[in-house]
Amino acid sequence: MNLILIDNEKTWKNLLPLTYTRPVSEIRIGILTIKEKWEKHLKSQASYRCTDYLSHKFSVNYKAGKNNLFIASDVLPDAKLVSAIKKLKSNEGLKKNGALIACNTSAATFNLDTCKEYEASILRIENVWDIFIKNGEALKADFELLTKGRKSAALSKSNTLVGKKNLIFLEKGAKAEAATFNTNSGPIYIGKNSEVMEGSAVRGPFALCDDSTLKLMAKVYGPTTIGPHCKVGGEVNNSVIFGYTNKAHDGFLGNSVVGEWCNLGADTNNSNLKNNYGEVKIFSYATNGNINTGLQFCGLIMGDHSKCGINTMFNTGTVVGVGANIFGGGFPPAHIPSFVWGGAEGFDTHRLDKMYESTTRVYERRHKILEADEKKILEIIFHETTKFREWE
């Protein structure tokens, strides 16, 4: 089975700025990325069909003349859907409400008219806020997938566990001491070589992925996911952090999604509720304007490589692009473009060469190298987002 996860252009645009730097299937929701979920369910390595400039890093493995299984990258798997997909014969497919789910075909393209309507419900990520809204359901499914038939590493007796013991799982090398875990509202997953420091209080559903740290006295309300190689402290509520990101100090993050390689300075806070309790609007790259989320609670959406200084205050429903550096007093605007430098008093352009310098240093701290293909992606995003930097 040759598995190819394909991006829908409309959904990819709806998920900007998070998808400026990745295909949709590289979004983390629950414990795993969407790609990792499909690979585990189908026991097959996946490749990507995505927007052109990302394809140099996220390539497609298309086998001409043979059947390829195309799956929509915004759809999350479950046992029933996986079973239906495995039963697809050559040139058969599934769709839901007119949108593709999967197609098994030897052709490079497929006809939706030949796909059967899938009657059961599915979990689909169509907007940036879906990531934290649907994170609880995805986290519970991933917990079952990853822990079924396995035994957890031992939880130290210095911790306090409230709820069912079988709903907390520690991978090899995970550490937790003198913390409180509550599984009554959902499972808790502690990844390989991760650590929950003393005094932390965690209410599930919650995932701390591999090599991450929950710092002293952290307070976490689920559903929350902290991706791999992160350091997180303070108060976090119903948020998803993709990975390689630090929120190491006090401050509140709620109903938010933060990409990779971000840093939130000490005492950074975001508002997730308007003073009038009204529905939150956020900036949409797809419409180039504000759209209504239909949500009363919606916090911060931050693209990769963005950072903010100490005491930064984010308005309800703030959207930050890629490579932004935010600092200074007051509330910055609710849409902060990519590659800017400044805050409430105004912005200048964050030059690419300067960003490469700082990003290279950040990568070196994690024993990584800023590769040429990543630089090219950032360069294309820089030019694509010039229209949002009005002073240029």
Image (cartoon, rainbow, N blue to C red):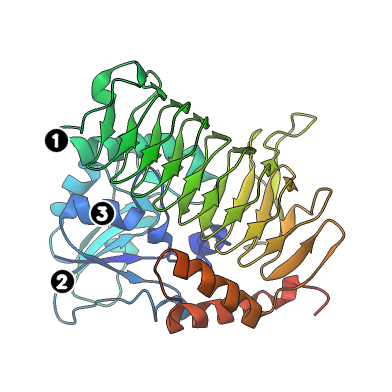
Q: Please report the residue visible at 57 percent of the width from the left and 78 percent of the height from the top.
A: 356
Mark closer to the observer (1, 3): 1
Residue denoted by label 1: 150
Above or below — where is 335 with respect to 255?
below
Label located before the other in sequence (1 or 3): 3
Specify the amino acid type for callout 3.
Answer: Trp
Label drawn at residue 38:
3
The crowd level at tag 1 (other Cα within 10 Å; few <14, some 14-19, many 20+) is few
Q: Please report the residue visible at 70 percent of the width from the left and 33 percent of the height from the top.
A: 273
Mark closer to the observer (2, 3): 3
Q: Quadrant of the N terminus?
A: bottom left
Q: Is residue 116 visible?
A: no
Q: Is residue 179 visible?
A: yes
Q: Nearer the viewer, residue 251 or 136?
A: 251
* Number of numbered callouts drawn: 3
Above or below — where is 73 with respect to 323?
above
Label 2, secondary structure: give it.
loop
Q: Quadrant of residue 278?
A: top right
Above or below — where is 349 with respect to 28?
below
Spatial CA span between label 2 and label 3: 17 Å
Label located before the other in sequence (2 or 3): 3
Spatial CA span between label 1 and label 3: 20 Å
Label 1 close to label 3 by CB (< 8 Å) = no
Residue 60 image point, x, y percent: 30, 76
Residue denoted by label 2: 67
Spatial CA span between label 2 and label 1: 34 Å
